[in-house]
Amino acid sequence: MITRQRLAVGVCALLAALAAGIAVPAGAVADETTAQDAPKVDLVLDVSGSMLAKDIDGGSRMDAAKQAFNEVVDSTPQEVQLGIRTLGANYPGNDRKTGCKDTAQLYPVGPLNRAQAKTAVGTLQPTGWTPIGPALLKAADDLNGGHGSRRIVLITDGEDTCAPLDPCEVAREIAAKGVGLTIDTLGLVPDSKLNKQLSCIAEATGGTYTSVQHKEQLSDKVNQLVDRTAHKVVTPVAVDGTAQCATAPALKSGLFTDREEFAQHRFYRVDVKPGQELRASVSVSDDRQVSPDYGVTLRALTTHGREIVRGEATGSGRTDVMSTGLRYPKAKSDDEDAPAETVCLQVADSFSPAAGVKTTPGMPLELTVDVVDGPDQAADVASFGLGRGWWLLGALVLTGFLAGLVWGWVSRWRIAIWRSN
């Protein structure tokens, strides 16, 4: 006699067998990750005299920073190359010119010796000025080389004291080089001017700003940023778009970064073969104050200037990023030797700077280009727009149908036995 347990096991086995039959074929999802150089992080610590203030959980700001650094050094992933740079750590005098040069590499960016790094941090004593701008320039140099992700984590309790070298402009210059470097900032004092400056630095490179008032919060945030650097990322390739398609750079599938002036047009060229589809998207970051009412347009044009398709986005008020995209399928040709079509991608924006805002360098622009095999039109029609996923839906429907038949048969069989008894 078949027990309920045996019945349940039999049904589960049948469903498992059916499910195995519709498993995704090997190789259906390609591993697109590629070998990258080791990720790098440069921790930039303010060691100016104000770090002696005791207003973080009853201790000094310097003690909180040291504790955070020690915890971060202990937990840094093995694959991350970590460095530590100071600002205001060595010159105690009043000469501004000298004080604004006071930035030094405490521990070089490279494979981490945890004991040596913690010993170096333990020797720090709050001393001098707050040259944030010069420190960021040096930190960018510390991270030169390789193609892995790169991140600067700035921890400070005060504004830069070395104007006219504006640290926000320094961050924009670093971003304009297209080196794929991110600057994250952490402020230890809830001051509106400091918040504004650190937010501007972070936004210029796509980083984050955090106001920190507790030891545990500081440690957690720095650890989070270092761990984030270890995640594999696609590093954008820096390109220079032009004002005309004829002289524009030729792009293949990939992620690209550029700079675009206010109300400027930037052109790029992409070759699309018959039967392929061009998919493109663009994001423009308004990393400074802009006037309300703006927009971003991405157009696909022929080499003669005829518009093929466009994508556009508009807004008003305040935003950080505007994005849009487009798709262009190139019809198949009966001629196997048919040449590829050169498509001109035009990026335009209608941002305008607020009064007194600098217009250079241009705003960060990120362009994604993907040229893929076009959809099978017959398959699309037959599967009601499901494309290549029709087989999976069909298999799931068949599985459900068979499972229903089996369950119905088993139920009727059990009822028949019950009645016979």
Image (spheres, helix red, strand yellow):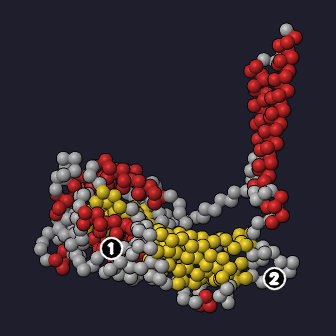
Instruction: Using the image, determine if residue 310 lies above or below residue 407.
Output: below
**Label 1: which residue?**
168
Residue at image location 62% in from the left, 76% down from the top = 310
Instruction: Please tell me how crowded label 1 is: few (under 14), some (14-19), or many (20+) other residues with Cα within 10 Å.
Output: many
Marks 1/2: CA–CA distance: 51 Å
Quarter of the image where the C terminus is located:
top right
- The amino acid at mark 2 is Ala
Residue at image location 73% in from the left, 56% down from the top = 28
Determine whether label 1 and label 2 are within 8 Å by CB. Answer: no
> Which label number is shown at residue 152?
none
In front here: 332 or 313?
Answer: 313
- The amino acid at mark 1 is Cys
Res 117 seen here: no
Quarter of the image where the N terminus is located:
top right
Mark closest to the chain's N terminus, 1 or 2: 1
How far across and how far down the image is residue 38, in percent?
A: 49, 63
How far across and how far down the image is residue 17, in percent?
A: 79, 38
In front here: 23 or 93?
Answer: 23
**Label 2: which residue?**
338
Q: Is residue 45 left or right of residue 23?
A: left
In front here: 1 or 141?
Answer: 1
Residue at image location 34% in from the left, 58% down from the top = 210
How far across and how far down the image is residue 302, in percent?
A: 68, 85
Res 307 seen here: yes
